[in-house]
Image: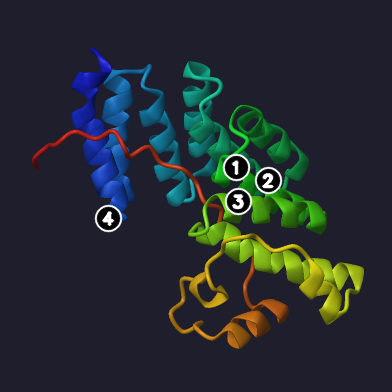
Amino acid sequence: MGLLSNRGSFNRGVYHFSRGEYLASIDHYRKAVERTPGDGQAWNNLGLAYYKLGKVKDAMRCLDEALMISPEDPFALTNKAALILAGGRHGEARYVIDKVLIRLPDDVHALNLKGLALMKDELYMEAHELFMRAVELDPRYRHAARNLEKARIRLASAEKLSDEDVDDLPRPRKALPLSERFDDPSDTDETVVSSNLQNGDFEDETLEMMEYDDDLVEWEE
């Protein structure tokens, strides 16, 4: 059975996933991969749905299936690196994400994820450079914009930089105002946001993972 005939189950999986109905999305993605085992996008999305339910081993198994079908799939590679990073294996995560960056050096998701891995290893200047590059490529990419501010603060603390030295750190040519980089609507004042970051109130980002959802066809319930 071809991929086109498989899109109904795939689309239903995307629909339920977007509503936070992860068990339902798993059911549909499983039907998709049972019908078409060579559908790497469905395997990737199935892995993401398992991850949302905290089933990391199942998620990794699905991503490995996706990568057996398409070893250079940037979505599956990025998601696998995110799971590896969540497991504390920072060097291995960087190795996997570098496979994406070799082919797609301007992939903002990969740049952000590698920056997070570098932060875990306290390589704050290198992380700062990657977050800044991601923000320059996509000024509305909140994950990288938020992580850029955290990298600046961690870098200042680690290197014992003065306020003037911090101000001299390079900034992206284009970026959202600081108050627009956070999802919490209460954090609208730049002073409040900076204070919260300085005091460690914002922990590392929940690892962002990538879902295939841009090739859908119409379907009815």
Q: Which residue is mark 1?
A: 110
| Labels 1 and 4 touching (C-beta < 8 A) | no
How much space separates mark 3 and mark 1, taking CA atoms? 9 Å
Mark 3 and mark 1 lie on one chain; the one further toward the N terminus is: 1
Q: Which residue is mark 2?
A: 114
The correct choice, above or below, for 80 with respect to 177 in the image is above
Foreground: disc 3 or disc 4: 3
How much space separates mark 3 and mark 4, taking CA atoms? 28 Å
Split into 4 quadrants, where in the image is the N terminus? top left
Mark 1 and mark 4 lie on one chain; the one further toward the N terminus is: 4
The correct choice, above or below, for 170 with respect to 184 in the image is above
The correct choice, above or below, for 203 with respect to 26 in the image is below
Q: Secondary structure at mark 3?
A: helix
Q: Amino acid at mark 4?
A: Arg
Q: Amino acid at mark 1?
A: Ala
Q: Which residue is mark 4?
A: 19
**Residue 59 visible in image:** yes
Q: Which residue is mark 3?
A: 134
